[in-house]
Amino acid sequence: MSEVAILIGVFAAAIIGYAAMLPILAERQIAGIERKRYNRQHDLDELQARFHRLIESVLDLDFDYDMGKVTPEVYVEQRKMLIGRSVSALIQLDKAEAQWNRVDQEIEQVIANYRGDGTSPRADHVEAVDGEIEAMITARRQKAVQG
């Protein structure tokens, strides 16, 4: 066998190996994104629970003030603190939701790339590699026919 044929064979094997590994690599990428999504969803749930607890605390404080259990000075100070913490929790909640939406978009992009819908650079690369492989196969067949 000539050196060129060996090099072509090694190159074709490398391309085929890469094409065979694409689904595995995509699954790993999707699994990593899913872990991020789970962690962010957990954080989002915690932030929502914290916000609701703070709002309930404000309502409880208002009720205690109306019943005369809390002095006006303590009421004003505590209410201001609880409202401030509620606003902080709400801001964090908004930021977490924005991050979560970005993760969803990443997941959709990975799925689209995996499906090869033709809108991704990876799909273009795979098509180019497929074209090279087909050209090598055709050249080998012609060479075999010629003799």
Image (spheres, grey):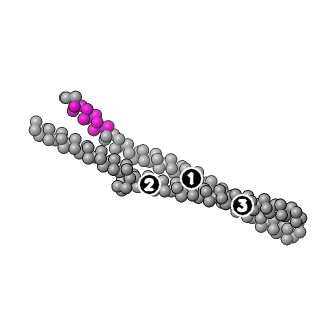
The residue drawn where x is 56% and y is 55% is 99
Amino acid type indicated by mark 2: Gln
The residue drawn where x is 25% and y is 43% is 133
Q: Which residue is denoted by mark 3 in the rendering? A: 86
Give the Cα separation between the discs numbered 2 and 3: 35 Å
Q: Position of residue 74 (x, y in %)?
A: 86, 61
Which picture quadrant has residue 58?
Answer: bottom right
Q: Which residue is denoted by mark 1 in the rendering? A: 38
- Residue 4 in view (yes/no): yes
SS at mark 2 in the image: helix
Q: Residues within 10 Å of mark 3 (few under 14, many from 20)?
A: many
Q: Which residues are magenta?
A: 4-14
The residue drawn where x is 30% and y is 49% is 127
Give the Cα separation between the discs numbered 3 and 1: 24 Å
Above or below, 125 relative to 46: above
Q: Which residue is denoted by mark 2 in the rendering? A: 109
The count of marks equals 3
Q: Position of residue 86 (x, y in %)?
A: 72, 60
Counting residues from the start of the chain, the first of labels 3 and 1 encountered is 1
Q: Which mark is residue 95?
A: none
